[in-house]
Amino acid sequence: MTRYLLRRLGQSGVTLVLVSIVVFVGVRAMPGDTARALAGEETTPEALAAIRAEYGLDDNIAVQYARYVQHALTGDLGTSARTGLPVLDAILDALPVTLELALFSLLFAVVLGIGAGVVAAVRRGKPAEWAASTVALLGLSVPNFWLGIVLILGFAIALPLFPASGFVPFGTDPAENLRRMVLPAVVLGTGLAAVVMRQTRAAMLESLSADYVRTARAKGLSPWQVTGGHALRNSLITVVTVLGLQLGQLISGAVVTEQIFVLPGFGKLMIDAVFTRDYAMVQGVVLFTATAYILVNLAVDLLYSLIDPRIRLGGAR
Amino acid sequence: MNTQLAAGRDTPLWRRLAGNGPVLAGGTVAVVFVLAAAAAPLLAPYDPARADFQAALQGPGWSHWLGTDDLGRDQLSRVIHGARASMQVGVLAVVLAFLVGVPLGLVAGYYERFTDSVVSRVTDTLLAFPFLVLAVGLAAVLGPSLLNATIAIGVSLVPQVVRVARAETLRLKHLDYVQAALASGGGPGTVLFRHVLPNATSALLVQATVGIPAAIISEALLSFLGLGVQPPDPSLGVMLSGAQPYIAAAPWMAVFPGIAIVAATLAFNLLGDGVRDVLDPKGPKRGGR
Amino acid sequence: MIDTEPVLRVRDLAVTFAGERTVHAVDGVSFDVRAGEVLAVVGESGCGKSVTSLAVLGLLPEAAKVTGSVRLGGRELAGASEAELRAVRGSELSMVFQEPMTSLNPVLTVGRQITEVLRRHQKLGRREARERAVELLSLVGIPAPRRRVDEYPHQLSGGMRQRVVIAVAVACDPAVLIADEPTTALDVTVQAGVLDVLDSLRTRLGTAVVLITHDLGVVAHTADRVLVMYAGRPVEHATADELFASPRHPYTRGLLAAVPRPGTPPEGGRLTEIPGMVPALTERADHCTFAPRCDRADERCTTARPHPEGERHLVACWHPEPEGTP
């Protein structure tokens, strides 16, 4: 277990370094002149040269990278060209919004996806399965940004139940915060719910036909205990793995969802930065996202081994 | 299940595919989309770019079946031309991803050791970016255009293709008959192209049917965000983004392009599910039978 | 032997699976089991032994149609509601399955899999159930039960797992224990141990045991009475001593001849085989299903169905070996 942990940590470390290089070089390759973007109104050659000197933009790219990493390790991700504020502050401001959104949509996806998946497997061949599978396929095929527009049309305009956009911090007004999170969470969670449903159904069908489920039934356990305690518990191993693989999907989706519902989260920060050519910000946000993603994947791997005793205890079979 | 048993393993692949409901339904819609996209200039009743302010923001009616947008452009014509862009990106991005990904995966799986570590680290690095973050980043670096969106999406799809190709190569390489080919002096070319690639077709085909709808959605998304097709060129994503300010006044502007995207992705998803069912009867299945 | 009432009484049990072609998996099976007695149900694979046991517990899939009577104590189980059956399963009537590798849930501890049946049927609390689970583990001969109770199935050997399965089955002192090929998947060296556990439980707890097996060695070792099945039908039913001493049905004779006996090398150096194949069960044949493989078969055998007949040694055959023939 320790060796596995160390190896996984090592791999993640290498990936992280490569990611930071790719991001750094990639941002340098973006069209436009960093100095010009930083200069703002002032565009005399002298001013640009001064800025280049100040930010070390004339140095070798390797030197620039080394300096960036050195600063990043102390928590300094540079300064936003647009606001003049530290990039890290902007990220930390946006983080809670995205985390809340991700959390609610994950909750939505897990509850709906696992519930529907279990029902579909238990009621195999019945209308319930057909309905669940069809809805899941639809959920998989509807792009979330269109779903967002349709939901705004339906539940913010035609039937004004929820606000169409905007964010209120939880600390300011919890009820209003939650009200404004409903539609975005549904939009972001739908695709994931569809994936979870399909995986749960497949895994449940497999475990429901397993010998140990027959044993559980021979023990006289209730259908609830057999399905929930025995079959679902085994199926969850697969579902958690898939959920882990889908987290990238969740982050991608958050970018769009925040754009549609005008939520001041991570995704909006990134898109806005791309459009305003705020290089330090793009770099910081992408690097932060990739790091978080790598760490979450690592966490999922560890969680996986926690659920499955065969992996946790390193047993043979 | 019974139909598959009845059809048996000896039936040609296309017959087994043609006998599968989802494949048939999805395939039909997909073919309609491809044809409509190819013949877009012939099918579209109006010039998709021609503005007619007299007719702005008209609802669906006889002269404009799907209504008009804020500039009075015909929505139906724009949807047809937009579907053309979607198909172009969908197919080309997947072709690009395969052209790059399959050779890399084959080589990584065949040589293992050093080559494999290098390829795997690189794919891991690309996989460390959420798909859209990568696509947005690449599109931002390359600059917004249809071609660049295709490249960005194609490159973003590469790591998954590499993974599948590599895993298949590793699996097949250890089968007896491939080992026999290796033992009797078959070079990498013979082994990979004669033995591995033909047998990896199923897995790669499934990957392709997953990739096309992903690419279609991504194109719409990049264009929606302003990083893909640039207005006034028609794209379903561009139409949706243009529809946002008029969502209350002219909901049809948002509804029809969206339905077009859903229909296209649904068709390819159905096709993909069906193909997977046919090629891998033991694998996870979709809806009821 | 007639002095005590049977705890389990099965009459004319029949199971059909409807489908494109209806399969008569079990047809006309009857038997009694008394407390402390071991009844062995013997036959080749696919002869309906396992389907019979699943039918008794009501565990067959919905597609299966079950007719006949299954009485446990004074209660009729055939046609009983799912809730009634659940109350009986695992408490009065329990089952040990063939595959110890797969019949335990891999993600739950051994203890949890024993305690859940105790908590379900005997309404024990968490702590009591756990204490009882430890007792049960030592009862089935698992060393260091206090440690084992917190382990997962993959940490145990096959023989140990089967002992756990038995512990689960006997946790609530069932009146009847059905063991479906309990030793088949195990190494020969651990088979005897598992059989001894079953045997000692029977003597100690007075459990009636239905032992399903194709292994005549196991039958000779443990069974009081034997029911031989062929192609879903009972063909011979007698005490173990009698059956081994003077088998009457040609099929039983063939089975016994196919068993290698130490000391007596088989003729021609080969084991005797029964010629022919087991018939498909897709039609409810109105004749002796063994006839195609039987060297005694005549016209009667292919036109009329023999039913089990006899006082204490029942045989379903038109030309049985006379009683007492070795």
Image (spheres, rainbow, N blue to C red):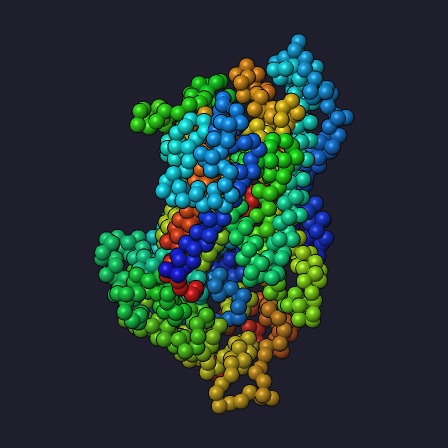
Relative image position of residue B22 (x, y in whole percent): 63, 41
- The residue lying at 47 percent from left, 38 percent from top is A56
- The residue lying at 45 percent from left, 59 percent from top is A211
Q: Is residue C22 above or below residue A179?
A: below
Q: Quadrant of residue B82?
A: top right
Q: Nearer the viewer, residue C239 or A297?
A: A297
Relative to A59, C162 lies left or right: left
- The residue lying at 59 percent from left, 77 percent from top is C274
Q: Is residue A123 above or below residue A144?
A: below
Relative image position of residue A135 (x, y in whole percent): 53, 35
Q: Is residue B240 among the parts visible in the rendering?
A: yes
Q: How many marks?
A: 0
Q: Nearer the viewer, residue B85 or B114?
A: B114
Instruction: Report the residue that reaches farthest toward the right.
Output: B42
Q: Quadrant of residue C221?
A: bottom left
Relative image position of residue A12 (x, y in whole percent): 44, 51
Relative image position of residue C58 (x, y in whole percent): 43, 55
- The residue lying at 56 percent from left, 68 percent from top is C306
Q: Is residue A261 among the parts visible in the rendering?
A: no
Relative to B55, A292 lies left or right: left
Q: Nearer the viewer, residue C28 or B54?
A: B54
Q: Is residue C22 above or below residue B221?
A: below
Quarter occupied by the N terminus of chain C? bottom left
Instruction: Report the residue that reaches farthest toward the front.
Output: A46
